[in-house]
Image: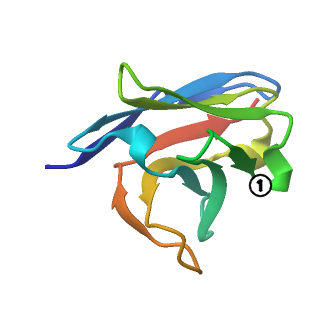
Amino acid sequence: QVQLVESGGGLVQPGGSLRLSCAASGLVINRDCMSWVRQAPGKGLEWVSDIDNAGDVTYYVDSVKGRFTISRDNAKNTLYLQMNGLKSEDTAVYYCAKKMGNIRPPLYDYWGQGTQVTVSS
């Protein structure tokens, strides 16, 4: 049974930092491309970041480049998203997900339950 469990969200001041975790079971995270996707209040899903399974190349949406870092700990089978310099527009529910192959547009076959990030003064 595949499970992805996010944690680490919360309320933070603008300019603050949070580290999100995604603990995986039933799959091995370094065998697949893993992603972080978010949904802001009243908006649709927005892709945030990927880490691939061919050289650990990372990708980010332009709005978070230089502030967010995606990584994984293979021994713990856990995906991370370090978020620095948080802005109010980063407020969203953050999900980790497993990307399916190289199809376009991208599809995801497994999702976590999400963790809430709120950036407010």
Is residue 30 shown left or right of residue 70? left
Q: Position of residue 76 (x, y in %)?
A: 36, 21
Q: Is residue 16 above or below residue 80?
A: above
Q: Who is closer to the viewer here, 22 or 57? A: 57
Give the residue type that dot 1 points to: Val
From the top left corner, tell me how far across and down residue 120 is, in percent: 72, 34
Q: How many numbered marks appear?
A: 1
Give the structural element (helix, strand or loop) at label 1: loop
Residue at 70 percent across and 22 percent down: it is 17
Q: At 72% from the left edge and 49% from the top edge, which residue is drawn? A: 59
Name the spot of residue 103 as percent of width and height, x first: 53, 77
Spot the residue most to the front: 54
Give the answer, above or below, for where 63 lies relative to 78: below
Q: Residue at the location (69% across, 35% down)? A: 119
x then y, percent, for residue 53:
53, 46
How was this image coloured? Answer: rainbow
Q: Nearer the viewer, residue 43 or 19?
A: 19
* Residue indicated by mark 1: 61
Q: Quadrant of residue 47?
A: bottom right
- Mark 1 packing: few (<14 Cα in 10 Å), some, or many (20+)? few
- 75 vs 105, left or right, is left
